[in-house]
Amino acid sequence: MTPQDFYDIEFIEAYLNGDLNEDQLQRIEKKIAEDLEFAAEIELHKSALIAIKKTAQEQIRNDLRLATNLLDKEGFFVGEDELSAYIRGDLKDSESIRKIERRKQIDQAFAAELELEALVAQSLRKEAQKQIQKDLDVVQDSLKKEGFFDSPPLSVTQPEEKKIRVISILSTKSRVWIAAASVLLIILAVGIFMNKSTGDDIFADYYKVPADVVTPALKPLSGSGAVGLSSIEQTNLGELLSAFDAYQKKDYGRSTKLLKKILNKEITFYQPKEDIELYLAESYLAQNMHMDAILILEGLNTSMNEKFRNRALVSFHLALAYIKVDQKVKAKILLEGLENHASYGTAASEILKALN
């Protein structure tokens, strides 16, 4: 190995990237220790390599951010709750409708899937109606056998003065059949929608939008307290305060938009970042966008750091969201882990009992 080989750029990069063998590594480290000029050359290359990697990482982040925004505009991040509402024909949010329609235009597979789901939903409704009619026919046949319909129907051709209204006293047996028919109708109506209403009822009974605890921590930083913040940090602080102002006013659409924007930035003046992610998830839950909330809550549930104070809240609300989308097995696992919790233990036990 000649002295000139030490200055070869590829050789230096291999050293900085840890790609040299043991013999080469010993030689270059000896050269660095003995030659101050060469050591300075190595430091220069190291600084340049770090700058290049940092620039590349930033470019990748920017590209991902742009791609995410584009996909969002094209409807690729529409939640399952919104898609279900769209299929049923009761989605009200015009922006969500626009995104879904746009994606249908550019994604034929997505359009075909939506059409198939709409047909399946329509078929299920028709089958449910057929079953109701079938059971009603059985009840009607039974009532006929009991003589409930023995009175002759009025003829539309009879003169008004000759029409006779027949009033009969119902037998005890007939009244029993009427009661049975009424009960059957109630059972049918409840039975068809039981699976859905159970999850909906549990979520409605136990989910409460949590109070904002971030704003009180941010207030000291605003006004005169913002002197120590850079102009960028002051801008970010203003946006964060606006997001939680919208949250407090129950304008969850706006809080969702602002919190998503903030999470794409580097926030250094407020930690932990998990607080902001939690309130984005809560904004989703408050809008019945449960799958969007689940994605965030699952991430929080698996990566919560020691500073995060809302561990139990995340687990409980994730369990409720699972129940809402009929993922009851996952919900039970979380709830069983909360049964001894001071704040959520009683509710967890009640829900587990209802699920079982």
Image: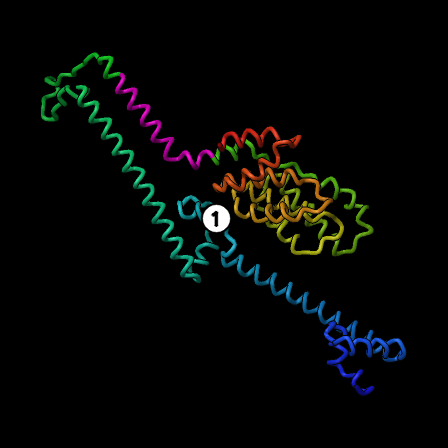
Q: Residue at x 36, y 35 (%)?
A: 192
Residue 337 in the image, given as x and y percentages of width and height: 61, 37
105 up-or-down from 251: above or below? below
Q: Position of residue 92 (x, y in %)?
A: 46, 45
Q: Which residue is mark 1?
A: 80
Residue at 52 percent of width and 35 percent of height:
203
Would you say 164 lies left or right of 229 here? Answer: left
Instruction: Tell me: residue 171, above or below residue 205.
Output: above
Toward the front, the furthest residue is: 23
Taking depth in this image into account, of 199 and 338 the one nearest to the observer is 338
Q: Nearer the viewer, residue 188 or 163?
A: 188
Residue 237 spot, x, y in % from top left: 72, 49
Q: Position of residue 286 (x, y in %)?
A: 56, 40
Type of colouring: rainbow
SS for callout 1:
helix
**Residue at figure coordinates x 33%, y 43% from the top left:** 124
Screen quadrant of the N terminus: bottom right
Q: How many marks?
A: 1
